[in-house]
Image: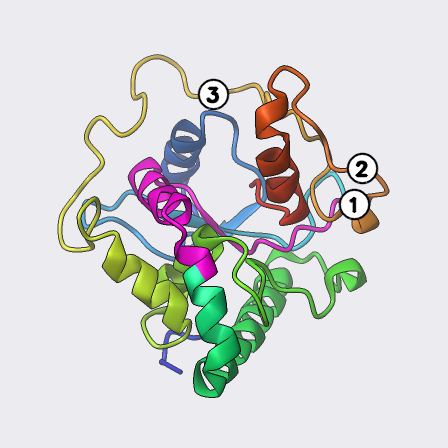
Amino acid sequence: MTENSTAPSGAPTPADLEVLSRQLGRPVRDVVAIPARCVCGNPLLAATAPRLGNGTPFPTTFYLTHPVITSAVSRLEAAGVMAEMNARLEADPELAASYRAAHEAYLAAREEIGRRAGTGPVPEIDGVSAGGMPSRVKCLHVLVGQSLAMGPGVNQLGDEAIERIAEWWTRDRCWCEGAWDTEGAAPSRDLSRHGPQGLPSMTGRPAPVRRSDAGDSATEAARTEGGEEA
């Protein structure tokens, strides 16, 4: 584990929050820190409080926001990389042990973020990390977010995913120009369809279905199950 394997430093500035909102296309919520930045200084992801301001438990501590990275990681998911990684986890005890350690590091970082946010314990997500950890890969965005936030060597599969998106994004140059809308006012209205976020067992609400596009309902439900909205 690297020296960066604790909670990130760097509280967000008002400018950071505006950029995050523009990246996401909606107001960002409950951001505690900016764990990683582009070489130009723009945020790559947000560290989010484990309990949102509306009271909802939020397990996805490291939330990837940069559109270029999120799109690149989605390409990997569409190419079947998660299934490949899951097969490796079943076949490789050393990799599986490393992945469990990443899960524990994620929980420790969330605890520290919670202390910084002043949210206190969040028993609804006690022992629950994100992205399918500690035994499965369900969301590469989560693993990449952890690798960017906590540094190389913490989440091996997240590190690998970053290497595999090098065709579309790399750490050593700025990919921000044209990646999000910079004209006009920043988003000020939350257009989320989901309402309170988190596992249905946490919120008491069923996973939502996008009624206008039944073909995307499984994807929508999966994102809700992972609590993946900042």
Residue positioned 45% across, 87% down in the render: 94
- Quarter of the figure with residue 24: top left
Q: Which residue is mark 3?
A: 187
Residue 7 visible, this angle: no
Q: Is residue 74 magenta?
A: yes
Q: CA distance from mark 2 to mark 3?
A: 27 Å
Instruction: Kindly report which numbered mark, 1 or 3, lies closer to the viewer in this rendering.
Output: 1
Mark 1: amino acid = Pro
Give the residue at the far left of this rendering.
173
Circle 1/circle 3 CB separation < 8 Å: no
User: Residue 108 location in percent, x, y?
Assistant: 58, 74
The answer to whether the residues at label 1 and label 2 have Cβ atoms under 8 Å apart is yes
Query: Residue 210: x and y, percent?
Result: 65, 23
Q: Nearer the viewer, residue 84 or 118?
A: 84
Residue at the (74%, 45%) spot, across then down: 56
Please give the range of residues in magenta: 56-83
- Circle 2 sits in a helix, a strand or a loop, which is it? loop
